Image: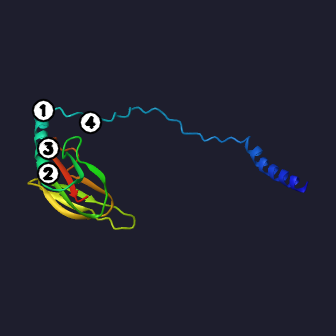
Amino acid sequence: MKDKRHLLAIALCLLIPLGGMTGCSYDYPEPERTPTAVPAPATASVHPYNNLQVLEQEAENYAELERLLRTSPGPVLLYEVGPLDGPLRGFGKFEEVPAAGQYTVTAACVGASGARIYIGQEFPGATFQPVELALDCAGATSQVIALQQGYVFAHLLLPSPGDTPWTGAVGGVRVTGTV
């Protein structure tokens, strides 16, 4: 009998706060939006390339870039190419490194100068020090780097602002090694 009373008392103690809160309502008024005199400008979308001469130049540059990047032997771990100018420029890519070891990074650009490729890995607690390859577009640049098991990134950085004219310049990176 005493246990039943004890259980009943606990149940009532739990129900009383719930009953008290059922009548509560909260009102969080939001500020009313007033119309502005000037409508917000529409965001400009990226238009497709429409200059055939530049498209042809870009296709030739990609073919030359592929030739330059193929000089590094071994299985490909990471490969990425992209435009260096125009509305859609640059790139960034991650790939998984299956095993620690020495890997060759080959980078090149065609039709421009001053591009930089950063490649590296991030690990918790470790100092972040990506490898920087400066590209002069006279040929491919290669460097052997040590990679640990995990993920590696490659990122193309351009020194000029994003509003440069579209010329068809391209750049790329290829990481190869014994996998």
Residue 67: % across, % down: 11, 48
Q: Which residue extends farthest right?
A: 1
Q: Please tell me which of labels 1 and 4 falls first in the chain.
A: 4
Q: Please tell me which of labels 3 and 2 falls first in the chain.
A: 3
The numbered dot on residue 52 is 1
Q: Does residue 62 appear left or right of residue 96 in this picture? A: left
Q: Please tell me which of labels 3 and 4 falls first in the chain.
A: 4
Q: Nearer the viewer, residue 144 or 61?
A: 144
Residues under numbered marks 2 and 1 in contact, where contact means CB atoms less than 8 Å apart: no
Q: Please tell me which of labels 4 and 2 falls first in the chain.
A: 4
Residue 174: % across, % down: 20, 53
Amino acid of disc 4: Val
Q: Please tell me which of labels 3 and 1 falls first in the chain.
A: 1
Which residue shows up at 50% across the image and 35% down it?
A: 33
Residue wearing tag 2: 70
Colour mapping used in the image:
rainbow
